[in-house]
Amino acid sequence: MRRPCKVAAALLCLAVLLLLYLLAGSAAPPPAPSSSSSSLLSTARRPQRLGRSPPRRSPAGGGSASARKPGEQKHPKEPSSLQCMHLAVVACGDRLEETLIMLKSAVLFSNRRLCFHIFAEDSLKPEFEKKLKEWPSSYTKKFESNFYPITFSVGNAQEWKKLFKPCAAQRLFLPVILKDVDSLLYVDTDVLFLRPIDDIWQLLREFNSTQLAAMAPEHEIPKIGWYSRFARHPFYGTTGLNSGVMLMNLTRIRSTQFKNSLIPGGLTWEEMLYPLYQKYKNYITWGDQDLLNIIFYFNPECLYVFPCQWNYRPDHCMYGSNCRGAEQEGVSILHGNRGVYHDDKQPTFKALYEVIRDFPFEDNLFQSLYYPLQSKFLDTVHTLCGRIPQVFLKQIEKTMKKVYENRVIVYLGANHRY
């Protein structure tokens, strides 16, 4: 009798537990399964068809599915305008060749794709297009070209066009015209890149939350700088700024209210330009560069100052070497202002320009560019800038080694596949 009683008692307990479980289950929904168990359940319940991925559930609110395999990283595709580095230049008059040599130096050494924004007089556009199409396809695939007429959105166009040099003031209107471009590197036509644009483009990441543009000082030594001795208007810092190489976050420029000497409140970039010019036009010498100095005098928190090797000019060596960054790392961007590529006042600058101009695209960089450059430099050692050839050669030698190594790796990799 005892054993049947025990069995009956056990069955009764099981029945009570089962009843309690069913009651609890009907009162509240079961907890959501983990992602791994959910995946397993889905696989078990829904047989997959060959060639089709299982359907994804949209999250509440109708958004697109974001489920990924464990450990899988999401890589959103950037718009094409964000994938390339934007380079702008303004060319008028006889600046066609200079501009093409500058663009050539950019394409020779850069790694990422480039988007050229070329502002030129109507008469120059066909010649630009013709010359760029003559470049080898191995280089033309590295860039795209966009051409724009010379336009000024505010003020008197003829007045702007004659400011300092023909069309130079166009750079002031880049944030207004290139509304779909987030960031941009502007350079004068007389600039040569001696290392990849990728490297100066990285400086955008160093901007803090208030900085929206980057330039180099006009001089390193205040007592011999032009602004510190002669300027009759406000200027940035102790030596002023040189605007021949200017890195810009256009999105920030367009959205910022700038402090100024015109009204107590702030003004947008476009609102500020013409009134500022009208106020200071009788006191400025270097045109648009002076206006930029005035703007950043009142808004110093908006400027990132990069070192002199990113905008190396004759002033950095004709009075003795005074750019420490170039002495340590070599010249990164050469700025041959004052027409030094076309006269004999600074033969070191002219040598660099001529060697890059004459370099055949498909030739070996060392044989057809670096060695001729060394040979030309031997004829410049009697000049102040020619006494420090290592400053000019250090960075370009390093850059060419990287280009050569990359080509060898690509070549060997292709052969290895075969």
Image (cartoon, helix red, strand yellow):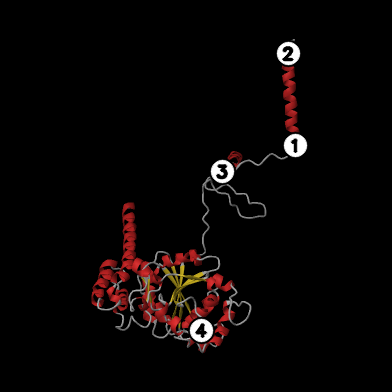
- Look at the picture and state if 57 lies above or below 279: above
Q: CA distance from mark 2 to mark 4?
A: 110 Å
Marks counted in the figure total 4
Instruction: Specify the label residue 48 is tagged with.
Output: 3
Q: Are marks 4 and 3 in contact (CB under 8 Å)?
A: no
- Look at the picture and state if 206 lies above or below 149: above
Residue type (three-letter) at the residue carrying disc 3? Gln
- Look at the picture and state if 53 lies above or below 319: above
Q: Which residue is mark 1?
A: 26
Q: Nearer the viewer, mark 1 or mark 4?
A: 4
Q: Nearer the viewer, mark 2 or mark 4?
A: 4
First in sequence: mark 4 or mark 3?
A: 3
The foreground one among 274 and 16 is: 274
Q: Position of residue 31 (x, y in %)?
A: 67, 40
Residue type (three-letter) at the residue carrying disc 4? His
Q: CA distance from mark 4 to mark 3?
A: 74 Å
Mark 3: which secondary structure?
Answer: loop
Q: CA distance from mark 2 to mark 3?
A: 51 Å
Q: Which residue is mark 4?
A: 233
Mark 4: which secondary structure?
Answer: loop
First in sequence: mark 2 or mark 1?
A: 2
Instruction: Specify the label residue 318 is tagged with.
Output: none
The foreground one among 170 and 223 is: 223
Q: Which residue is mark 2?
A: 4
Residue type (three-letter) at the residue carrying disc 2? Pro
Q: Position of residue 50 (x, y in %)?
A: 53, 45
Image position of 359 (left or right of 162): left
Image position of 413 (left or right of 19): left
